[in-house]
Every structure is written in C-alpha cells, then in structure tokens.
Amino acid sequence: MEFRVRRAPRIETEITVPGDKSISHRAVILAALSNGICVLRGFLPSED
C-alpha cells in the first residue's frame, strides 16, 4: 500500500474552541507539525 501526502495550502486564521484536555493536546501536536509561530492560549494540562 502506498500513500502520498501533499502539502496543504497555507492557513492563516484564529479559532476559539472550548477548553478541553484532549483538544489542548491535539493543538500542541498540530503546532509542533506546523511551520512558523503558533500561539496557544488557555491550555489545559493534565496529570494523567
């Protein structure tokens, strides 16, 4: 099986979502994969 992944067009926007631990973790993952600067506000850490 072969998968080809192409770069998506650049997205420059601001979104607001309700605070949630899993959403916070997903935001960190997406920020780590992005190029440029990402600002995360209202991050909800967890100890589990």
Image (cartoon, helix red, strand yellow):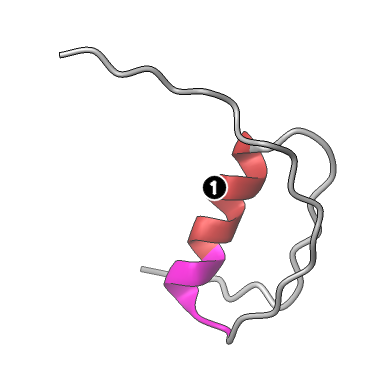
Residue beneath the point at 71% across and 72% down: 15
Q: Quadrant of the C terminus?
A: bottom left
For residue 21: magenta? yes
* Depicted 11 relative to depicted 8: above or below: below
Q: Is residue 31 above or below residue 14?
A: above
Question: Residue at the spot x=49%, y=69% of the render?
Answer: 23
Residue 37 location (% of width, % of height):
84, 44
- What range of the chain is rendered magenta? 19-24
Residue at mark 1: 29
Quarter assignment of residue 3: top left
Q: Is residue 40 above or below residue 29?
A: below
- Amino acid carrying mark 1 in the image: Ile
Q: Quadrant of the N terminus?
A: top left
Q: Is residue 37 left or right of residue 32?
A: right
Q: Position of residue 4 (x, y in %)?
A: 38, 17
- Position of 38 with respect to 28 (left or right) is right
* Magenta stretch: dominant secondary structure: helix
Residue at image coords 74%, 48%: 11
- Eyeballing the image, is 3 above or below 42? above
Say left or right for 18 vs 16: left
Q: Residues within 10 Å of mark 1 (few under 14, many from 20)?
A: few
Q: In this view of the protein, which residue sits in the foreground, 28 or 12?
A: 12
Instruction: Give the camera-side residue of 45 and 6.
Output: 6
The residue shown at (58%, 47%) is 30
Per the image, label 1 sits on a secondary structure element best described as helix
Can the viewer see residue 35 in this picture?
A: yes
Query: Residue farthest to the top?
Result: 2
Q: Is residue 34 magenta?
A: no
Tag count:
1
Pick whichever, 44 or 18, lies toward us: 18
